[in-house]
Image (cartoon, rainbow, N blue to C red):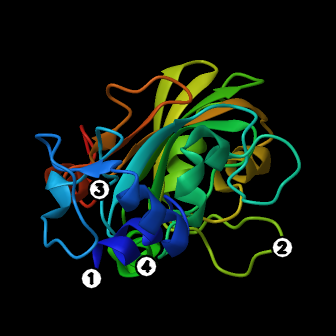
Amino acid sequence: MKLVKLIANLGYGSRKEVTLMFREGRITDPDGEVLYADDKVPHEHIRIDEEPLDPPAGMVLAMYKPLGATCSRKDIGRVVYDLLPPRYRVRDPALSTVGRLDRDTSGLLLFTDDGALLHRIISPKARVAKVYEATLANDLRGDEGVLFASGSMMLESETDPLEPVTLEVLEPRRARVTLTEGRYHQVRRMFAAVGNHVEALSRISVGALTLEGLQPGEWRALEEQEIARIFASPAGG
């Protein structure tokens, strides 16, 4: 792929704007030598304004989604894309969230522009474990773990039972839940079905990938070995 198209696809500007960046000498190699549009240079050796080029297509990001942000491009109010560089909104192929966390749920959120990988992660056949910590309005009554793990629990307005879910009691009103599906508001609806209410909810891991090193609102690109952890069992699982 020609450098102009490559850089434009990463969202740095239109092809015309990227061509002007070349003419202005803003695109260089790591030693500061000016690059030209017809140069053949490895992706990792390209700098724009002395900064490394964004990861190529196929990248995966991990974000510590804060409360109050939605996983949409168009919602009124704060959206998760506001926490990324503006050019990430116009990358080609597009950068999408891997599943969603609602406005009132914080924690680990993944993004990718690799459609095949996205579908692999969210496919029910992959059985990728998602681990949540929930703070509840009322004390756990004691039988939730058995019910959640039964494989026969039904949610309101649904016709198929939930896959078995693991419940770990942390405190009388705090629990860790591990599930392999991603039904709409699943954790909140499960606790509602047993007469409780989730006051706070955070996703702490996807597979064996955790929030390690991230604070609310922060994000980073994942290395290959970290992407592989998405498909591994969570710690203690």
Label 1 and label 3: CA atoms lie apart by 30 Å
Residue mark closest to the camera, 4 vs 2: 4
Label 4 and label 2: CA atoms lie apart by 30 Å
Question: 153 above or below 101?
Answer: below
Labels 3 & 4 near each other (Cβ < 8 A): no
Query: What is the crowding at mark 2: few (fewer than 14 residues within 10 Å), some, or many (at least 20)?
Result: few
Q: Which mark is residue 197?
A: none
Give the residue at x 55% y 43%. 84
Amino acid type, label 1: Met
Query: Element under label 3?
Result: loop
Label 3 and label 4: CA atoms lie apart by 16 Å
Residue mark closest to the camera, 2 vs 1: 1
Q: Position of residue 109 (x, y in %)?
A: 50, 47
Question: 67 above or below 123?
Answer: above
Labels 2 & 1 near each other (Cβ < 8 A): no
Q: Position of residue 99 (x, y in %)?
A: 56, 62
Q: Quadrant of the N terminus?
A: bottom left
Labels 1 & 4 near each other (Cβ < 8 A): no
| Residue that mark 3 sits on | 230
Label 1 and label 4: CA atoms lie apart by 20 Å
Q: Position of residue 96 (x, y in %)?
A: 54, 65
| Residue that mark 1 sits on | 1
Give the residue at x 24% y 38%. 236
Residue 98 visible within the image: no
Labels 1 & 3 near each other (Cβ < 8 A): no
Question: 214 above or below 86?
Answer: above
Amino acid type, label 4: Gly
Q: Quadrant of the C terminus?
A: top left
Q: Which mark is residue 115?
A: 4
| Residue that mark 2 sits on | 157
Query: Which mark is first along the chain, 2 or 4?
Result: 4
